[in-house]
Amino acid sequence: MSTPLRVGLVGAGPWAGMATAPLLAAGPATTLTAVWARRPDAAAGLAGRHGAVAAGSFEELLERCDAVAFAVPPDVQADLAVGAARAGRHLLLEKPLATTGAAAEALAGAVDAAGVVSQLCLTNRWSTAVRTLLEEVAGTTVDAATTQFVSGAALPGSPFATPWRTADSALLDVGPHALDLLVALAGPVERVSAAIGPAGAVLVTTRHAGGVAGSVLLSTTTPGARGPLRAEVLTDAGRLVLTDPSAERPDVVGGRMVADFAAAVAAGVPPALDVHSGVRLQRLLAAVAQSLSEGTAVPVPTSQETR
């Protein structure tokens, strides 16, 4: 059996404690070696629960690992991940990469210059339900597609009602999941038109290459809603619907994701969902945000298609 990939974790908040740390520590493809956060007590507590070391600094974290995972706000991730890449550390990146396109581009440039492997944590892409839907759609002619992610995660009292998640409605939080799947199903987006409801729900209509019509519904302020990611595709073979991806255990899905990351690092070959996928997604998010701000349809750079 190959040696597990040594991963250091940046961040010790709710998501780090509930998902990232236990996933990396569970192995067998990875081992959690160190945790660093701006709150030393939180880092120490999380590291102690998973047999890792609480690093006293970001530099110490880098010395103790071969790859770095992030569970921090996107602007913090974009800044620190550049330093990790320059230090030769592989990157397991949360979505979105950053809060601005320029920061996402800078991170991608640092990854390319260092020659490290990067992977974007769009966890739903590793679910059996999403993989099955993508296989069913392959080879068909798509006429229209719709995705949605509706939850109450930003309502008061939720551990995920953090400033970056609530600052831009649901767009930066659940938007990456729904937009990424829409592109995977319907192809590159050429134009978006978005509107926001009084409680923060976002509705996006999209026009894709080849004339395919699409739409996305996003909310993190809907009482009682907990997702999951949903999708429906109209094709020449009929109507295809995403089965519930949350029916599969999160640790199983996440285990596939980190195992693929470790395999990509071992092979030295970036996975399909790498930092450049994150940059393309960042451009699409920016176009939606611009449409929301201006109240008009906005063109999207064609280079945001998935590989």
Image (tube, rainbow, N blue to C red):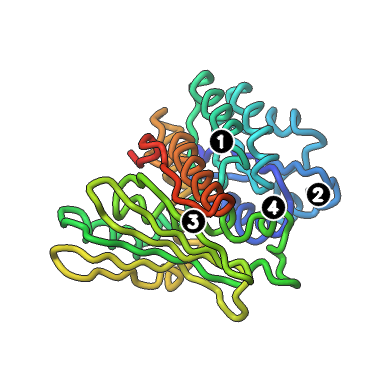
Q: CB of mark 2 within 8 Å of CB of mark 1? A: no
Give whichever of discs 3 and 2 has the lower sequence position: 2
Q: CB of mark 4 within 8 Å of CB of mark 3? A: no
Residue that label 3 marks: 254
Which picture quadrant has residue 234?
bottom left
Quarter the C terminus occupies: top left
Please tell me whether residue 199 is drawn above or below residue 269 in the rendered image.
below
Which residue extends farthest top?
113
Viewed as shown, does residue 86 lie left or right of 193? right
Measured as percent of width and height from the top left, residue 179 is found at 44, 54
Q: Is residue 28 in view?
A: no
Query: What is the spatial separation of the Cα atoms under label 2 and label 1, in whole angstroms?
Result: 33 Å
Q: Residue at x 73, y 58 (%)?
A: 162
SS under mark 3: helix
Query: What is the spatial separation of the Cα atoms under label 1 and label 4, in whole angstroms?
Result: 16 Å
Residue 44 shows which numbered tag?
A: 2
Point out the frontmost of discs 2 and 4: 4
Please tell me whether residue 248 is drawn above or below residue 3 in the rendered image.
below
Residue that label 4 marks: 164
Point out the frontmost of discs 1 and 3: 1
Residue that label 1 marks: 101
Viewed as shown, does residue 165 lie left or right of 279? right
Give whichever of discs 2 and 1 has the lower sequence position: 2
Query: What is the spatial separation of the Cα atoms under label 4 and label 3, in whole angstroms?
Result: 23 Å
Residue 89 shows which numbered tag?
A: none
Give whichever of discs 1 and 3 has the lower sequence position: 1
Q: CB of mark 1 within 8 Å of CB of mark 3? A: no
Point out the frontmost of discs 3 and 2: 3
SS under mark 4: helix
